[in-house]
Amino acid sequence: MNNKTILVIDDSATIRKLVDTHLSPLGYHVLLAPTAEDGLRLATETLPDLILLDHQLPGTTGFTLCQKLVEMPDVQSIPVVISSTLRNRAYAEYTELTNVVDMLPKPYTADVLITTVANSLETGALIVTSQSQGTAVPEVIDDVAESDLQGSMAHFGLREVLDFLNNSDKRGTLEIEAGHTRVWFYLDKGRIQGVAANQVDQDELLEFLPEPMRELAPVLKLTSNGGSCAQIDGVVQLLDKKVLDPRLLGKLLRYQAALLVFRCFTQKTDSFRFESAKPFPPLCKRLPLDVSLLALHVDGALQCRESELHDDDGCAYVRRAIRGQNLDRTGLSAQHMKLLGLLSEPRSVDDLVRRTGWKPIEIRRVAFGLTLAELAERQTQSQTANVIAFEPNPVAAERMRAFLADSNGRLAGKVVRDRLALQLALRRVSPDVMIVTLDSAETAKLIGDFAKASRSQLASAKWVIVFPKESPLQEHVEWQQLLPFTPNATVTSPFTPEQLISTLVEILRDKNQGPTSPAAGTSPTNDAGHVLQGAV
């Protein structure tokens, strides 16, 4: 927890207020002194961790005060940061003073102030010791660990790397380099515990920030953009003091992770390195996400711009399976799991809207998230129509299978010969087209009962009735009364594959036309006598 004391010695009330306003909320204990005399007294009484000293003070200078501090054993090792509008002209005076560790040129922004203070606190004691003893200052504070795994993203996709580490239950930090940006994934227990980055577009992150989290926008700037240890310690301290709601902050961290993951997977990445020994940030330890990559993909797609979805009216979505893929769904809502379950076969956005009752934009976003996770893929909607054909005659059933196989990928499905097989087929596939051969009144009654029992599953299916040649049933209208719908087309066998396929293509062309009730009328016969089409 951050409990560092900062002594500010500056005659400007504006500067004192600025420093106090921006450092106190981060957990620092800020002491303010308008004169050199007050500053020297507070320094000896409180022994602060860092002194932020103005170069020009009433009746004296920061240089003179620094000399006095160096001569006093109790305070001579306190790191001092010099601040001045004179910049280099002022800083040249301090080169021989062992307690001066950094310079802060005025005017400065709050971000520069916070970063300078945090870095000086972490390195100041080492710099003072080195300057006092005449030893060299190391280039870095912590040793740079050797990577356990590293490589170029030209040969490995990010999903592949994350899946490998999570499937192997590795704990550590995965660093991704993408241009000038670095993104860190904190991995443990086969899941993502946090995601942070540097050099990210803050405006872009704030653009999608939900209204309940707006008050945490300053915290998001710290947690998402490589905030220093001291800054994050300040956030943790606010949690400890119950100033921040941990549940709301947890949602903010997940929002941050989702947006950063989305950017990583939609922009070019260059290289990766994984270190098992690199410690997690304090906030990640305190509020781990413990979420799957899949859930973050969906979250990110739900927040992105609509123009980034890269879909069109003619696409359908279908689930895909990749060998070695991590199938963890932790954090994915039951609602989104339902949509994933529907993608066992290609489905258009319109079809998914009918089956779920969701808005089209939500369907598109969730489906796009699934494609980013490579758990689903887009297809052109007209690529394949799913068919279930009921044909009791074994010879005709085999011919129907051949027709489907010869459709050049436009049709796919199952040919069944009895009610049980028909029920099993419907469990696996929600058909675009039902082809049913009516060879008797008993078959018509069986199909009618089946259609009533499976009404919800067949709500969007087109119906094609096949009559065997010279069937007496075709000449009687009673068969229509046994069915709870009027078919979209009727076909008389024998027929050619081209006739059947052209009929199916025609009825599938009209997305809004579905089977109607018997009161809508009967299907007219065409001149050839082979294809009898109803309301198409």
Image (cartoon, helix red, strand yellow):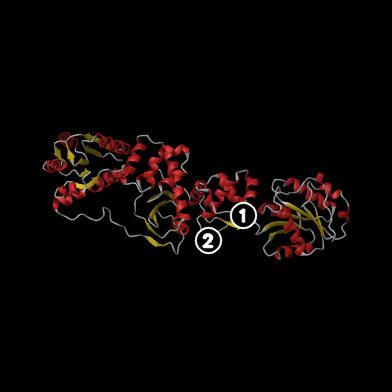
Q: What element carries label 2?
A: loop
Residue 415, horizontal then vertical, whole percent: 73, 59
Q: Is residue 286 left or right of residue 7?
A: right
The answer to which of 56 and 383 lies nearer the viewer is 56
Q: Tell me: residue 157, above or below residue 517.
A: below
Q: What residue is shown with label 1?
A: 316
Residue 25, horizontal then vertical, whole percent: 32, 37
The answer to which of 65 and 173 lies nearer the viewer is 65
Contact, CB < 8 Å: mark 1 with mark 2?
no
> Quadrant of the rendered structure where residue 286 is?
top left
Which residue is located at x 68 percent, y 65 percent? 408
Measured in 3D between alpha carbons, the distance from the residue under mark 1 to the one under mark 2, in whole angstroms, is 23 Å
> Dot 2: within a 10 Å radius of its alpha carbon, few (fewer than 14), some, or many (20 or more) residues?
few
> Quadrant of the rendered structure where residue 55 is?
top left
Q: Look at label 1 and name its amino acid.
A: Ala
Which residue is located at x 39 percent, y 36 percent? 244
Q: Nearer the viewer, mark 1 or mark 2?
A: 1
Q: What residue is shown with label 2?
A: 323
Give the numbered dot on residue 36. none
Residue 242, horizontal then vertical, whole percent: 37, 34
The answer to which of 190 and 131 lies nearer the viewer is 131
Indicate which disc, 1 or 2, sits on the residue closer to the N terminus: 1
Q: Look at label 2 and name its amino acid.
A: Arg
Q: Split into 4 quadrants, where in the image is the N terminus?
A: top left
Q: What element carries label 1?
A: strand
Q: Is residue 73 left or right of residue 124?
A: left
Q: Is residue 267 visible?
A: yes
Residue 170, horizontal then vertical, whole percent: 41, 55
Q: Is residue 173 visible?
A: no
> Dot 1: within a 10 Å radius of its alpha carbon, few (fewer than 14), some, or many (20 or more) residues?
many
